[in-house]
Amino acid sequence: MKIKLYGSLSRKLGKELDYTVDGSKTLENILDDLSKIEPDLRPGNPNVLVFVNDVELSLLGGLKYRPKDSDELKILPVAHGGAI
């Protein structure tokens, strides 16, 4: 799965990460894994918007959504400053 990061997150971690999912991980699990690298990516952080295939996370069932390797995850800090 491709994870695209924007704003301050892209400056800290790069613009894109590859993450392998096996169908058993939820978005909560994935964000928990990523938060070990960057605490701002903790699950449920209200200062970060999460999109799967350009659909906001809450429309997909929230953090319990189980992404596929073909999905694209975009993570955007609320105060992103326009940086890509």
Image (cartoon, helix red, strand yellow):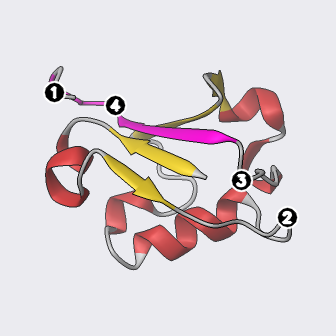
The residue labelled by disc 3 is 69
Mark 1 vs mark 2, foreground winner is 2
The residue labelled by disc 4 is 78
Segment tinted magenta in the rendering = 71-81
Measure the alpha-carbon separation of dots 1 and 3: 26 Å
Picture layout, residue 67 above or below residue 55: below
**Pointer 4: residues within 10 angstroms few (<14), some, or many (20+)?**
few
Q: Of the numbered discs in the image, which one, if any, rests on residue 83?
A: 1
Kind of residue at badge 4: Val
Whole-percent x and y of residue 40?
A: 34, 59
Query: Magenta span has 1?
Result: no
Earlier in the chain: of badge 3 and badge 2, it is: 2
Mark 1 vs mark 4, foreground winner is 1
Measure the alpha-carbon separation of dots 1 and 4: 12 Å
Earlier in the chain: of badge 1 and badge 4, it is: 4
The residue labelled by disc 2 is 23
Earlier in the chain: of badge 1 and badge 3, it is: 3
Kind of residue at badge 1: Ala
Labels in figure, total? 4
Query: At 75% from the left edge and 43% from the top edge, which residue is drawn?
Result: 62
Query: Magenta span has 75?
Result: yes
Measure the alpha-carbon separation of dots 1 and 2: 32 Å
Mark 3 vs mark 4, foreground winner is 3
Query: At 61% from the left edge and 52% from the top edge, which residue is drawn?
Result: 1
